[in-house]
Amino acid sequence: MKNSKTKKIILIIVIAGILAAVYPAYLYFMPHRDVQDTEAFAALSSKQLVDEYLKDNAKANAKYLEKDGNSKVLIIEGVISSITKDQNDQTVILLKDADEEAGVNCTFLKDAESRIKNLKVGDNIKIKGFITLGASYDDDMEMYEDVIMQDCDIIE
């Protein structure tokens, strides 16, 4: 009897170990959303998007997020304020007018590099992507935080 209990415990541990290894692999290899082939929910300026979030963050989230928490795909137009690279060597473009408190920080897909290599500060562009964070004001730091967009590509 003791032998069968030990076998059951070992079996449970083995199954739990397999699940613990398989689930992260599933998350890593699962297909990601294809933002560029998804129809955009809305097209608006960077200023409009930032203003909506600064006015009422909860209302903007309700408007631009799906029920599952994923962002709806948006087309945003704005003036390039800066062009940088992130720690993953992806291009990050900030769309922000000089008089705006916050802007829209757009991280571009790797395969978009050839389409954005000739862009420069001051250019007016349209991008397509999804929001991961809305604009806000940080009272402790006394500064505005930008809208963060991911998987962006330029709309020509």
Image (tube, grey):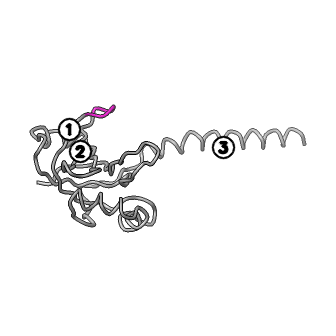
Amino acid of disc 1: Ile
Label 2 – label 3 distance at C-alpha:
47 Å
- Give the residue pinned by disc 1: 83
Amino acid of disc 3: Ile
Amino acid of disc 2: Leu
- Name the residue located 23 percent from the left edge and 56 percent from the top edge: 46
Query: Which region shows up in magenta?
Result: 85-89
Is residue 137 positioned above or below 87 on the image? Answer: below
Q: Earlier in the sequence, mark 2 or mark 3?
A: 3
Q: Earlier in the sequence, mark 3 or mark 1?
A: 3
Q: Quadrant of the C terminus?
A: bottom left
- Give the residue pinned by disc 3: 15
**In the structure shown, which secondary structural element does the residue marked by tag 2 occupy?**
strand
- Give the residue pinned by disc 2: 94
Image coordinates of residue 44 in percent, x first then y, are 22, 63
The residue closer to the viewer here, 111 or 55, is 55
Q: Nearer the viewer, mark 3 or mark 1?
A: 1
Image check: 139 left or right of 54? right
Q: What is the crowding at mark 3: few (fewer than 14 residues within 10 Å), some, or many (at least 20)?
A: few
- Name the residue located 78 percent from the left edge and 41 percent from the top edge: 9
Image coordinates of residue 81 in percent, x first then y, are 19, 43
Q: Nearer the viewer, mark 2 or mark 3?
A: 2
The residue closer to the viewer here, 85 or 46, is 46
Image check: 7 left or right of 69? right
- The reply to whether callout 1 and callout 2 are in contact (CB within 8 Å) is yes
Image coordinates of residue 128 in percent, x first then y, are 23, 55
Label 3 – label 1 distance at C-alpha:
48 Å
Main secondary structure type of the part rendered in magenta: loop
Is residue 131 positioned above or below 7 on the image? Answer: below
